[in-house]
Amino acid sequence: MCGIVGYIGSQNAVPLLMEGLFRLEYRGYDSAGIAVMTSRGNQVCRRVGRVRELEAALPRRLTGRAGIGHTRWATHGAVTQENAHPQVSEDGRISVVHNGIIDNATDLREVLIGKGETFSSETDTEVVAHLIARSSAGSLEDAVLDALGQITGTYAFAVTDADHPDRIVVARNGSPLILGVGDREMFVASDLSALVRHTTSAVHLDDGELATVTAGGFRTFSREQENTAKKPVRIDLEAQDVDLSGYRHFMRKEILEQPASAERMLRGRLDERFGTARLDGLNLSPRELRGFRRVKMLGCGSAYYVGQVGAQLIEELARMPADAEPASEFRYRNPVIEPDTLYVAVSQSGETADTAFAVREVKRKGGQVVGLVNVVGSTIARECDGGIYLHAGPEIAVASTKALTHMALGFALLALALGRVRDLSITDGQRVAAGLRALPGQIGRVLADEAAIAEVAVGLAAASSLFFIGRVRGFPVAREGAQKFKEVTYRHAEAYQASELKHGPLALIDENLPTVAIVPDDELTDRNLAAIEQIGARGGRVVLVTHPGVPHCARGSARITVPKSERELDPILLTIPVQLLAYHAARTLGLDIDKPRNLAKSVTVE
Ligand code: AGP
């Protein structure tokens, strides 16, 4: 969603701010803007649409040594130039970029209008610019603190003041904000990817923390004005991690990275001798792991579907009751938090607001929650009691692929660890560990069939509506297949348990509605094939995503096979073709694959 960049130093801020905005594009946005401290005061430029349109609209010879920039995802107010950020105070002195939502903005706006202020946008952020400008405090820091004292909500702010062009003041509460430390220059960003190429040293602000950023360095402090003395940490991010590196789309680059990234993720974590997993980051002793009676996964969208894969893995390997629930619904049903349940928050970005709120709900009620998170140092990673970092590397495409595979691998490791302190035998543990070890190579073999899968995708792209079906281990794969397909192709795609077809959806089957059927070689193969017969008998086309051992089926109009893995791990390999189907169908349709309409990479608002 929204993105923030900031720069202060001896270089011209404008190209650096624009580069940062280009790097933040993947998060999803509808308008963009920058504010620059120039020799003629504060200059602001905003545009609806892509960052390149903003770039084209910048005044020639715009230069300055400090500035802030923003990509906006509309929440308060329509997508207009007036509502784009930076928002500016009436006198043009204060500029503010903001991620998050100010809950009491409407009330504050009315009070300010009563005091004679005129607003030029519908945004909650403009209220903050007015509050800062009206403050009688002597410093920008105090004026920002004054404003923070009056607002409620979530935010990451960066603020500049034409009267104090030597500094940017930033504040965080509920939305990520990072400082990048350079050589006599400083950066501000909501996302590490905006800092790549410029620094490898970063400071993650905590909620309730502020910072003054100058060319010479930074000072972090609390709302009570106490120094928090934050130390920079090293960031392991290379430009090629966030560049296309010759690929046309990040989605394909990330799909093809999976053999290498999966191998890296498993390295050092599999203990084949004892058939278990080494998960020091969980901060749970074997005794504590044994104490849990139940496991609940909390995640949103695709992360929730992988949570279902995780629940099945844990039920199968550890024989513990386990289920997954959309984190977005969790706290609204006033959940009973059980002390002997292990809650697992799963998130690529680590910033998904719904999942972060679910984590807080568990913790508020005394529960124990660990995270399966990709982005190191992210909000969810830091708020959990421990966890497993996914180490998928940066994922830029809005449609998640490799991070989901890594989530499934993380769940497999967790299931092994939970299983081996219970009834999972050493031989079964070793069998699954060896299966995991083989997975990266097997993923590579699926990817080698990309051209054939792409041909099938071309056929699917012509349909306006599709079904994805599966049973038990195949069902979360079907859900993910439908999700990926609709995200990037804008086609209607719906997932059903194959067993449910005859209870209603079969009525929709005809020659215009193809079905992608996930049919592993397992105890349900025959039943799956029977469902396919029913579809074929009604003229429906079927694409089988299956294992080599599954008999050819007369009704299957296309067949994609993946290598057989250990049965518990089947969903991981079966998911790879549905990623490629979605990608190549979207490519056939000529769509903006990496930035699908209406979607954001990281959903930081409820
Ligand atoms: C996946 O392709 C989607 N973009 C989306 O469902 C995503 O998985 C969800 O928003 C959760 O994101 P997270 O993993 O960053 O928490």
Image (spheres, helix red, strand yellow):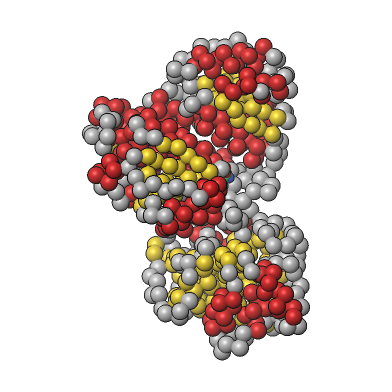
Considering only vertical position in the picture, is 144 above or below 350?
Answer: below
Residue 377 in view, yes or no: yes
Based on the displayed image, in which of its 4 quarters is residue 533 positioned? top right
Decide which of 157, 60 is in the foreground and name it: 157
Which residue is situated farthest in the top direction here? Answer: 554
Q: Along the horizontal axis of the image, is 556 left or right of 381?
A: right
Residue at point 52% right, 21% down? 519
Based on the displayed image, in which of its 4 quarters is residue 84 positioned? bottom right
Residue at point 45% right, 70% down? 181
Q: Along the horizontal axis of the image, is 130 left or right of 451?
A: right
Question: What is the total number of numbered labels drawn onto the structure image?
Answer: 0
Q: Position of residue 62 (x, y in %)?
A: 68, 74
Q: Which quarter of the image is occupied by the C terminus?
A: bottom right
Q: Along the horizontal axis of the image, is 374 left or right of 275?
A: right
Q: Position of residue 447 (x, y in %)?
A: 51, 31
Q: Which quarter of the image is occupied by the N terminus?
A: bottom right
Residue at point 62% right, 46% down? 594
Considering only vertical position in the picture, is 432 above or below 523?
Answer: below
Decide which of 9, 235 is in the foreground and name it: 235
Considering only vertical position in the picture, is 154 above or below 521?
Answer: below
Q: Position of residue 427 (x, y in %)?
A: 26, 26
Residue at point 57% right, 87% down? 137
Decide which of 259, 537 is in the foreground and name it: 537
Residue 38 in view, yes or no: no
Q: Position of residue 336 (x, y in %)?
A: 44, 47
Considering only vertical position in the picture, is 400 above or below 602?
Answer: above
